[in-house]
Image (cartoon, grey):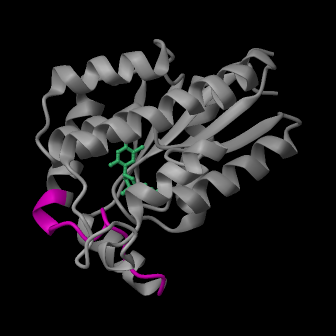
Amino acid sequence: MNGKLIVFEGVEGCGKTSQMQLCSEWLESLGVSVVVTREPGGTELGLHLRRLLLEKPKDKLFGTAQGEPVAQVTELLLYAADRSQHVEQELKPNLAAGKYILCDRYTDSTIAYQGYGRGLNMSLINQLNHIATAGLESDLTIWLDVDVEVGLARKRKDGIGLDRIEQETIAFHRRVQQGYAELAASYPSRIVRVDGSLSKEAVQQVIQGILRVHLKELP
Ligand code: TMP
């Protein structure tokens, strides 16, 4: 069986983590060999980058008392660096070994967050995505679509506190959401929208149906 790259995308609190977990259990029950990974942070180097990227300003990781702001292009380059390492160390070898990879975020996150959210130049983002992935695209991307406020409320409820990007303005998160909507409209055969406001079980049923349709070789 050929390996497959299946990506889960969406705004904060869209439910990716629990859906990926359920999906992984279902695929394993079918005898499929599954790897679950994420960006940023799917490698050892990536875990350091994840901490640098997401730590809350008040955690004072940076030199100044207020926490040095992360410049927008710096942020973009750090996500690209994380992706490049992830593609080389994790994605390519596992695909070559015939694994089904469930990946929490990939190139569309950079387009949605740094492109639509921050307003950075799309052609620069596309170039960096291309360099970082060496052209490796997802076989299928599941976009879990939930209302931005609903997602952020879920995040607030989990009690961990919001990270640097979750703390962005509601307008930022709405632009990210708009980005996903436009990406899904532009790439209908690669990106499939799933209504993330349904119950956990109902969302999982929909995802399994989509995987069955798109990945014909599933046992
Ligand atoms: P998550 O893994 O909990 O979803 O958090 C990752 C955060 O990083 C989330 O706020 C989205 C953000 N992000 C970007 O801004 N650009 C990217 O390219 C990626 C992969 C994530």
Q: Quadrant of residue 143?
A: top left
Position of residue 67 relative to residue 52, above or below, is below
Q: Position of residue 217 (x, y in %)?
A: 74, 19
Q: Which residue: 13% across, 29% down? A: 121
Q: Is residue 180 visible?
A: no
Q: Which residue: 56% across, 45% down? A: 46
Q: Position of residue 150 (x, y in %)?
A: 31, 73
The quarter of the rendered structure image containing the N terminus is top right
Residue at far front of view: 63
Q: Which residue: 27% across, 21% down? A: 126
In this picture, residue 70 sits left or right of residue 39: left
43 vs 7, nearest the viewer: 43
Q: Main secondary structure of the magenta part?
A: loop
In this picture, residue 162 sits left or right of residue 219: left
Position of residue 100 relative to residue 171, above or below, is above
Q: Which residue: 86% across, 46% down? A: 29
How many marks do you count on the picture? Answer: 0
Position of residue 183 relative to residue 163, above or below, is above
In this picture, residue 218 sits left or right of residue 114: right
Q: Is residue 27 visible?
A: yes
193 vs 172, nearest the viewer: 172
Position of residue 71 relative to residue 181, above or below, is below
118 vs 197, nearest the viewer: 118
Q: Quadrant of residue 68?
A: bottom left
Q: Position of residue 42 (x, y in %)?
A: 61, 44
Tell me the magenta residue range. Answer: 159-172
Q: Is residue 178 magenta?
A: no
In this picture, residue 129 sits left or right of residue 147: right
183 vs 168, nearest the viewer: 168
The quarter of the rendered structure image containing the C terminus is top right
